Image (cartoon, rainbow, N blue to C red):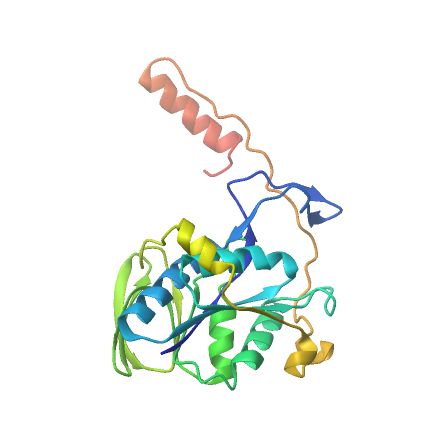
Amino acid sequence: MNIYVLMKRTFDTEEKITIAGGKINEDGAEFIINPYDEYAIEEAIQVRDANGGEVTVISVGNEESEKQLRTALAMGADKAVLINIEDDLENGDQFTTAKIIAEYLKDKKADLILGGNVAIDGGSGQVGPRVAELLNIPYVTTITKLEINGTSVTVTRDVEGDSEVIETSLPLLVTAQQGLNEPRYPSLPGIMKAKKKPLDELELDDLDLEEDDVEAKTKTIEIYLPPKKEAGKVLAGDLKDQVKELVHLLHTEAKVI
């Protein structure tokens, strides 16, 4: 099988994020593989091991993304492709990323494309479905189970706390939800092998794309941190007095009643 994974380099939200000049300050920030993309990488490896084939991980970004691509290779992917847009585009959005990826994949005869359900930095969940639409192939989002039998596919997806089972066929794009699998940690042998695995770097010119072809359709107006939460109040006294005080506060301060 010809398997591709869409991977994004994201901020580690476990670390402290600061804002400088209306942008997220990257100095000293920690970057990781988008956690939902880790599920996609793991599933791709498992599908390849069960059905044969090759796993290629794709990322659109800058040269710093090579570290995360090497991690994906250490997990067990076979190849990696970095489409470096740092010198070509000042700003991009989900349309930009999807257009670039679809242009790269249009003649690759992909059987299965996997991506994360959302990126933890943006949370739009648009790139995967947009790529599928541009390639004119079916897609299923937020999947928690994937079964492949020849060209037939049965997918279980998360729908607001319940599950939905869908039958479809290859070629197919899916986006991974938490619970699909348990992503593996790169082993030491895997890390050593990753250094020798192919990692190709492309630019827009290599895809016959112009800057105007992938110009962002949206504009970021402002980036800001959420306001600090005020300390909560602890009510004391008899239960009857606490209830009266709570009703009073809900009416005068919270203004919800």
Q: Nearer the viewer, residue 90 or 86?
A: 86
| Front residue of this view, candidates 251 and 188 | 188
Instruction: Report x, y in % for residue 235.
Output: 41, 19
Instruction: Kindly identify the residue that appears in the image at 56 percent across and 79 percent down.
Output: 104
The quarter of the picture where residue 234 lies is top left
Query: Residue 208, how many percent across, how many down?
Result: 67, 84
Q: Position of residue 252 (x, y in %)?
A: 52, 30
Q: How many tags in the picture?
A: 0
Q: Is residue 243 visible?
A: yes
Image quadrant in which the C terminus is located? top left
From the viewer's perspective, tell me whether residue 57 is left or right of residue 147: right
* Residue in the picture at 62% in, 63% down: 61
Asked whether, in this view, residue 88 is left or right of residue 13, the answer is: right
Q: Nearer the viewer, residue 172 or 245?
A: 172
Residue 70 drawn above or below residue 173: above
Q: What residue is rendered at 63% in x and 56% in y?
A: 64
Q: Which quarter of the rendering shows the N terminus? A: bottom left
Instruction: Return the x and y of residue 2 as percentages of the image width and height.
Output: 40, 78
Residue 194 falls left or right of residue 39: right
In-image side of 209 versus 235 (left or right): right
- Is residue 118 visible to us here? no
Looking at the image, which residue sits at the far top?
Answer: 237
Residue 68, above or below 175: above
x 65%, y 46%: residue: 224
Residue 193 is drawn in which quadrant? bottom left
Q: Is residue 180 above or below residue 52?
A: above
